[in-house]
Image (cartoon, rainbow, N blue to C red):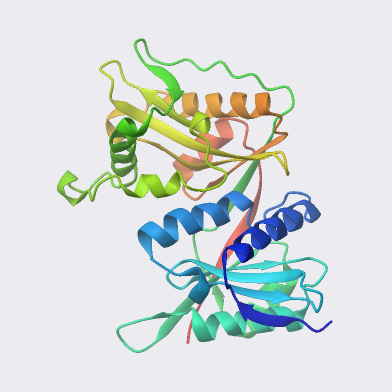
Amino acid sequence: MNLTLRMYRNEEDYWRIRAFLRGVYLLNNRLEKSWQVYRFDYCRWHVFMNIVHYKLEEAVAIWETADGRVAGVVNPEGMGEIFIQAHPGYQTPELEEEMVEFAENNLAQPGPDGMRTLQIWAHEDDRIRRNILQGRGYKKSEWPEFQRRHPLSNIDYKPTIPPGYSVRSLGDKEELPARSMVSWRAFHPDAPDNDYEGWDWYSNVQRAPLYRRDLDIVAVAPEGELASFCTVWFDDVTRTGAFEPVGTAPTYQKMGLGKAVLAEGLNRLKHLGATLATVSSFTPPAHALYSSMGFNEYSLLEPWKVEL
């Protein structure tokens, strides 16, 4: 089948891609061979707006059928870090070659030595993509993404937290600076606080269509400081909830607070009608935390790198 490549054009494309991702995710039996909708939302409203500052019109490519159906999408998430979203009904070696070639020509990261680098992610079961990447000189690198799943039938977590601590939803706008700071401390534990650049970025996160403040969960220390957090994204179409991000400030680690916010999120998802929860992990401590909370099923999304 002949497919046409074009660049992202407008807001209508945003919603068409979201519908496409939902359909592909369900066709793949909710295995993340393509992104869930929340990740595309998070990429647009957080990564592109707050971190790498890509414009969708310059970074997202769409392959369409003659009657206008989306067959595939290529998009970055970071500089030189590329994800290929392919409809299983249209995925062929020819299409994959074209998508990889587009990424190499347009989305590779230039280096100081004149070389360009590119990393493309491939699901461990995706033989077509893996074979093409190997044939083009890509090498599988370290740190695969463990795509963890937790079926939500018959769960009812009752976490134990230290006396004086509480777990609740994030407050109003006045609490955004505190929410931003606990995130900074969790993900930049060795950086000085004077490197902190403020909290305005979190307003962009809250603009994402799937964002819900009742699913933005925090653990609060006795003196009122935010200590731990998780943001949960619920897609009622696929009945799937995703945890991204999850973190605890260094001062409050090893107290069970990460488990507490995860448990609250899982219970809220079950109440909303979700039948599956997902989370990604990369490091041994994260693997251990999520396994302890029932995220024991997983598949691997593997990074493949090349110098061009």
Q: Residue 95, image x and y in percent?
A: 73, 80
36 over 5 or under it: above or below: above
* Tally of numbered tags: 0
46 over 260 or under it: above or below: below
The residue lying furthest to the left in this view is 194
* Residue 253 visible, this orientation: no
Choose between 107 and 37: the one closer to the eye. 37
Q: Is residue 155 left or right of residue 185?
A: right
Q: Residue 114, image x and y in percent?
A: 35, 89
Quadrant of residue 161 in the image?
top left
Q: Residue 79, image x and y in percent?
A: 42, 70
User: Which residue is at a point 73% across and 69% down the rendered structure image?
Assistant: 70
Quadrant of residue 123 in the image?
bottom right
Q: Residue 211, image x and y in percent?
A: 52, 41
* Residue 216 visible, this orientation: yes
56 over 271 or under it: above or below: below
Question: Is the N terminus in the top left, top right, bottom left or bottom right quadrant?
Answer: bottom right
Quadrant of residue 64 in the image?
bottom right
User: Which residue is at a point 71% across and 60% down the rendered structure image?
Assistant: 20
Choose between 90 and 18: the one closer to the eye. 18
